[in-house]
Amino acid sequence: MTFRVRLGLMAAGWGRDLRTYGMAPVVDRAIRTLLGDDPDSLLAPESYDGLRSPRERGYVVESTAAQLLKRKIAQIEAGTIAVCGPRGAGKTTLLESSVEDADFGMLAQAPATYAPHDFLLSLSVQLCESYIKHEGYEVPEVTHLSNVRRALRRAWTRCKRALKWAAFAVPALALVVMGSAAATRSVSKSRTEEVVARATQHVQALGRLASDTWNGGAAGTAVSLLLVGAVWWRLRRATQWNYFGRLVLAAITTAGLLLLVGSAAWALVDKDVRQRLTGLSPGILGILLFYFAVWLLCKWAVEQSWRIPAGFLRDAARKYCPAIGGTMLFILLISLLRNPQTQTVLAEEENPLRAAMALLGLALMRAGAWEPRPAEPALVTQCRNHLYRLQTTQMSTAAMTTGASQMLTLGTTHSTSISTIPPNFPELVSDFREVLGSIAGTLKRRGGKVVIAIDEVDRLGSDVQALAFLSEVKAVLGVPHVHYLISVAEDVGAAFVRRGLPHRDVTDSSLDDVVYVQPTTLFEARAMLARRAPGLSDPYVMLAHILSGGIPRDLLRYGRHIMETREKTQSDELIDISRGLVLQELAETLAGFRTLLSKQQWTPDTHEILNAFRTLGAHLRGACPCTEHEVQFALEHFAIHSPEELCRAPHPALPDTARQLIDEAAAYAYFSLTLLEIFGNEGFDRRRQAAEALGANGDPELLAEARQELGLSPYSARPLISAIREAWSLPLLPHPATRIIPAPRNHSCAHHASRRAG
């Protein structure tokens, strides 16, 4: 037997080593050989569900900014921290994660057009409602309902609760009674006479004692009763009753535990039960123990889920562990009831009585753990009252009538009406700080922290409006033991960084620190897409990262566009997908620039610029592999010519705004052309390694920085793109001889028309 076990273990180890060190490397090498020079150019992700759910919390990857924010929160006991960065950089996700990690937190949205009074009123209502829910109480309904409807609603709620309880309690009680009826009757028949005799003796003895005391024959008993009565009256307000109640509950719990342990010990002592247990095979015992262990593990994971850091693991523990645990418990019960070996153990004659004892013990233990519902905390009552004041107008009326008898007509009537005044802004500030301070102090004594996050401040418009908003809400900042997180635009964060140089503004007195959410690096982009689209190869990660410029929101958007382009082109190759994606993005961008240029003033000498945009757009919309050289020439022409060279007149009078827009469009076309030549040719891996070997200009991360630089200035982005082209061994663009972009084909390609239509 031992030899067979050792042989099986050795065979299992040999199979594992064969898969790990033999088959896996050989198969991987064979597949890469068949794929050629660019094995990673094939688009074959395992799934991309994470790209279709950009707001799903389970796919969030902790970034460098999140780690920095956690350190800053840990370093200060209370304060205001601004979270700034470009739009789409993940500021909202960062605030949501911080609120989720806090013991008590809430996220408020700053309105686009705000009134300080309305915003603070909304913030106060949200604070009170959040804390009432946090403490496990229901938020009061402030809508007007008649007394009859309110009573009917309350009665209907209790009726539904009672029906739900009865739907489980009545069948369970019937099954328990049916199962333990035979055992109970057998015990009652053998013990009834003895129990009745002893009870009769005790009752007769108490009767004789009461009669003697009443007739004066038991003076000592009478004195004792007098003393007990006096002490009983004195104990009506004593706090010792709490200890007495606890002793009673402890006694009930102990009795239940003894019944539970006694039933188990009775079963183990029984020779028939032990004989049947020893007859169980090790395989059956192992399977049953496995089911039981998995159920216990799932139950423990659900109970301890609040200790798991927020993210995928916590969501999985809360969503899947209850279902898995319930399934394991159900399978365990079915296995116990259906297996012939376990049926012999369950069929022992005295098992129903033991089961009844165990159930009675469990019921007593549950009764012993009962505690009266605690009174509503004073802070919850304060929040409830504050909600009523903020959301209702209360009125009180008192009337008094005095008069003489009916014979006299002399009399007076007095009526008084009192109505509460809605709080003004200073009073709102005072009440908000008081309530929030009480909440923070209570949670601080429990060892918790409070986080209040205010989002969307960067969407108020200009930095002037954002600073005005900060100056208005500054009054509610600085509450002890409270961390405020406010998302602001980059210019507001820059104002705080340069505080005192040469003047000070509201950021200096409102903010304690700033966390700048930088665009993601290629390493972070790989981690994000690996979580959301596992199996996505590195060239596609680079393409999405470069096009997004490191903005997480755009990174996910371009990840989805990659999948859309694959369906449109009906191809899984990097060359086809990258070309389709870049050309489509360029066409949409140039259409946007042309819309902006349409608002400018144009003359007969400058209208050729609009024609250049239209002609290039037509080339991009009709692009296919057959027109690759024509599109390449049109892009080079548009990217290299200056605005003056696109016009007929030698010195056209172009507005500065129009010139700036044309330069930006040309620089973006230059950038897109570079991406087409990098990703749209064979041998991407080989050319990337050669570019990286030449220095920093060949690093793919620099392409994402060039995309970021396009958002600042086209004039600083052009030299950077030229340096990248040189590192990738791409030719610098020659100056075209003609100033006019050739017209596109006036007919569609018959070979690729169906592919474009898809």
Image (cartoon, rainbow, N blue to C red):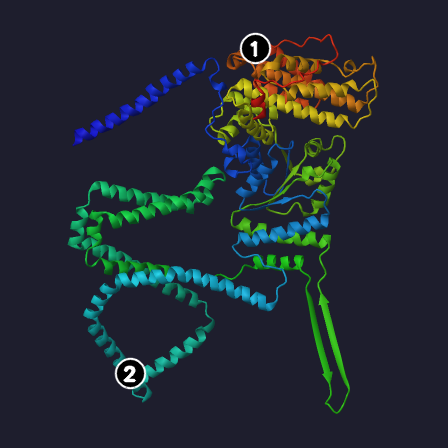
Q: Would residue 274 appear left or right of 623 to someone viewing this image? A: left
**Residue 66 place in picture, x, y as percent:** 56, 34
Quarter of the image with the C terminus is top right
Mark sitting on residue 207 = 2
Q: Amino acid at mark 2?
A: Gly
Query: Is disc 1 placed on a helix, strand or loop?
Result: loop
Q: Would residue 720 appear left or right of 542 to someone viewing this image? A: right
Q: Is residue 371 at least partly visible in the picture?
A: no
Q: Say above or below: 123 vs 637.
A: below
Q: Earlier in the sequence, mark 1 or mark 2?
A: 2
Which quadrant of the structure image shows residue 6? top left
Q: Are marks 1 and 2 in contact (CB under 8 Å)?
A: no
**Residue 142 place in picture, x, y as percent:** 62, 60
Residue name at image x 50 percent, y 19 percent = 41
Mark sitting on residue 316 = none
Q: Residue tagged by mark 1?
A: 694
Q: CA distance from mark 1 to mark 2?
A: 110 Å
